[in-house]
Image (cartoon, grey):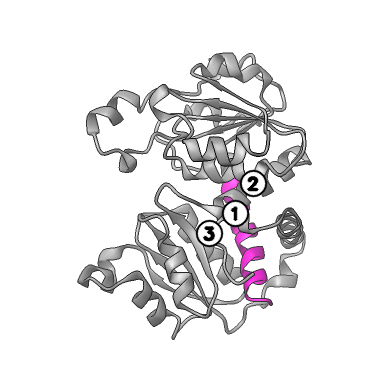
Amino acid sequence: MKDLIDIQELSTGEINDLIETAKDIIQQPENYATRCSGKKLATLFYEPSTRTRLSFEAAMYELGGHVLGFSEANSSSAAKGESVSDTAKTVACFADIIAMRHPKEGAPFVASRAVPIPVINAGDGGHHHPTQTLTDLLTIAREKGRLDNLVIGCCGDLKFGRTVHSLIAAMSRYPGVRFVLISPEELKIPEPVREEILHKQNIPYSELSSLESAIPELDILYMTRVQRERFFNEADYVRLKDSYILSPDKLRPAKSDLTILHPLPRVNEISTAIDSDPRAAYFRQVANGKFIRMALILKLLEV
């Protein structure tokens, strides 16, 4: 495997190997502190990011490597009209591996075809976000001790939420997984995800508009924000942005071992009063992102 553009490029065995490597990094970080000595990661972020960009950078530093790149398109030659392909070819002269976030679907794939070094998709529009999915899988594995036989609730923006699309694609590989899809009518799961993943693989799922009615049966609740940047119409965003707000009273009927995940950033869809609940795993999820990205960098660089 040269690149990671889509989570479906990874076999279940490869995913499990990455998770095991990440767990070993957590247990024995000193064994990995110089693995990428002399290597350089380029972070090409054409869209705003906090967790993803910083976790990639922290991952490379903790492997003993170096980081270069940009955190917004306006600070790169993209502002002058340079193509993604040309930018990638230029950066490949200076770096050993690229992590790219771009608002246009397919941009990291275009970059990967242009250069001989590995390219990691750090999010492309409403399309894919494979390293977030690896983060989610590591978190589920650590929180639940397994990736099979789980009822997973995905709540909020299921139409534009690339993290949800990738999570469904990945978790559908494991036996005994069932999805509960909770969203307003306008933000339901896209037809390609429904047809190509859920229907084609006979994955059991239900679609609801009520978070309260879904909560009691869930092992995992994956909350998402309604994303202003994916809407063409501000009025539609304002109307839908507060559709689901998770508060302590809504958690009362939930399982005592429910795991609450969120790719972050949150706006107001999870009350801060829940942050101290032991079931709230979203900041542990952030920490896991660094470890799984360390494992992925090692795999792609064949270190």
Q: If you read the primary sequence from the N terminus, does the residue marked by circle 2 or circle 1 appear first?
A: 1
Amino acid of disc 2: Ala
Q: Which residue is mark 1?
A: 7
> What is the CA distance from the residue labelled 2 to the residue labelled 3?
21 Å
Seen at 58% across and 13% down, the residue is 213
**x, y (%) of residue 66?**
52, 77
| Magenta segment boundaries in residue numbering | 285-303
Question: Closer to us: mark 2 or mark 3?
Answer: 2
Amino acid of disc 1: Ile
Q: Is residue 169 above or below residue 116?
A: above
Q: Which residue is mark 3?
A: 55
User: Badge 2 local density, few (<14 within 10 Å), some, or many (20+)?
Assistant: many
**x, y (%) of residue 24?**
77, 61
Q: Nearer the viewer, residue 106 or 184?
A: 106
Q: Which residue is mark 2?
A: 170
Q: Is residue 262 visible?
A: no
Q: For residue 288: magenta? A: yes
